[in-house]
Image (cartoon, rainbow, N blue to C red):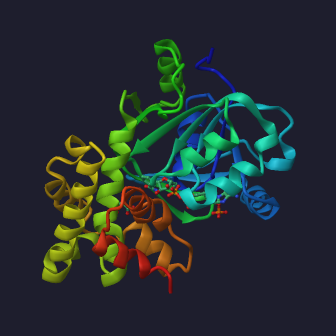
């Protein structure tokens, strides 16, 4: 049975991982951050902590506990994973020998497909998934800004069937240092699918047109493509028996683009910084699902291939 004061670790000390670690620290429930390598550790130690800034401004230095894989001297029973989807396998493999067989592993990230890979690697783990609309970004490697408040939902992955309501409540409480609030849902897959759909309809287009989210709405060609992307996603969702998961999807996509009009999407930011993107776990995941049931999603596919270059 889990406990709200259980010994949590966070993998992925970026914007989201550091956000959770910062509020946990402020709440007196430190969750050590597992850093990628020795070089990150040295940089963190030289800085003397993590600079945390709220939307209102005013940075404070927080001496969050951190470590690298080689320094883990106890096994991990509770792990919050906040790496980007494409880095998760490598990150978790580096600490795999420290993760208890029946550990609680909560994946807090965008994209789909990682949980299935982890299930193979950790057949007995209690695997959960989470989705957040909290907004955070890094001004520097260990300087984060909590830019906007949002909601966070979590629930067991479909391969995890033995969690009691008590366990879910305790996990939610442990992952909710104020003001963060994690709410349990019975169908996290639906929330993640819808989030994936919105990302498929916005992010690759912002890369194609090298524009902010809101500019897509003023570009007739992009608007037309957005509508076709959504039609393709609805077609696939219907074929998968998930029609009710994508109700009013185009409306929501327009709303998200309008609400985040000034944002450069995470994918565009990655491209502009010369980093790899989450495309294989967003549009790539959608295309794999489609191909497994013999459906072609032409416009999604052509946008996916712009990342080949
Ligand atoms: N930021 C946001 O507002 C939101 C983000 N999300 C999603 O949350 C997830 C995390 O995003 P975000 O925090 O922004 O991403 P970041 O890139 O800021 O953070 C990812 C972190 O993972 C670390 N990492 C990469 N490889 C390894 C490794 N092998 N071992 C240990 N750590 C590793 C990176 O280290 P390094 O920097 O040293 O490479 C980085 O600190 C993504 O799926 C994103 O789409 C969802 C909603 C909002
Ligand atoms: C909702 C959106 C498109 C906001 O920028 C996003 O999730 C992202 O950039 O990845």
Horizontal side, residue 284 vs residue 41: left or right: left
Residue 77: % across, % down: 71, 28
Q: Residue furthest front?
A: 294
Q: Residue furthest bottom?
A: 309
Q: From this view, report whether residue 129 is shown above or below residue 143.
A: above
At a point 51% along the width and 69% down the height, the residue shown is: 277
Horizontal side, residue 38 vs residue 134: left or right: right
At a point 42% along the width and 57% down the height, the residue shown is: 292
Horizontal side, residue 83 vs residue 278: left or right: right
Residue 5 visible in image: yes
At a point 58% along the width and 56% down the height, the residue shown is: 14
| Foreground pick, 173 / 292 | 292
Q: From this view, report whether residue 231 is shown above or below residue 49.
A: below
Q: From the image, which quarter does the N terminus lie in?
A: top right
Residue 45: % across, % down: 77, 56
Residue 305: % across, % down: 43, 79
At a point 62% along the width and 59% down the height, the residue shown is: 87
| Foreground pick, 232 / 25 | 232
Q: From this view, report whether residue 255 is shown above or below residue 3.
A: below
Residue 10: % across, % down: 64, 42
Residue 64 visible in image: no
Q: Quadrant of ligand 2?
A: bottom left
């Amino acid at each position: 049975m889990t406990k709200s004061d259980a010994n949590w670790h966070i993998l992925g000390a970026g914007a989201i991982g550091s956000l959770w670690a910062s509020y946990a620290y402020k709440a007196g429930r430190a969750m050590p951050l597992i850093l990628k390598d020795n070089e990150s550790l040295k940089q963190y130690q030289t800085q003397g902590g993590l600079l945390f800034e709220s939307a209102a401004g005013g940075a404070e230095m927080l001496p969050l506990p951190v470590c690298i894989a080689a320094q883990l001297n106890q096994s991990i029973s509770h792990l919050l994973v906040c790496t980007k989807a494409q880095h998760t396998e490598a990150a978790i493999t580096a600490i795999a020998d420290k993760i208890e067989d029946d550990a609680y592993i909560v994946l807090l990230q965008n994209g789909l497909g990682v949980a299935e890979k982890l299930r193979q690697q950790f057949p007995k783990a209690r695997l959960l998934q989470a989705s957040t609309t909290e907004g955070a970004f890094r001004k520097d490697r260990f300087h984060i800004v909590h830019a906007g408040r949002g909601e966070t939902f979590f629930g067991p992955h479909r391969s995890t069937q033995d969690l009691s309501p008590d366990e879910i409540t305790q996990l939610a409480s442990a992952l909710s240092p104020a003001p963060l609030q994690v709410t349990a849902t019975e169908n996290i897959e639906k929330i993640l699918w819808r989030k994936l759909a919105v990302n498929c309809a916005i992010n690759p287009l912002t890369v194609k047109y090298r524009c902010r989210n809101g500019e897509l709405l003023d570009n007739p060609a992009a608007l037309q493509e957005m509508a076709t992307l959504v039609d393709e996603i609805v077609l696939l969702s219907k074929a998968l028996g998930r029609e009710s998961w994508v109700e009013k999807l185009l409306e929501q996509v327009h709303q998200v683009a309008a609400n985040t009009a000034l944002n450069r999407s995470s994918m565009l930011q990655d491209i502009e910084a010369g980093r790899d993107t989450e495309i294989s776990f967003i549009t790539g995941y959608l295309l794999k699902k489609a191909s497994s049931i013999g459906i072609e999603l032409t416009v999604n596919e052509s946008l996916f291939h712009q990342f080949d270059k």
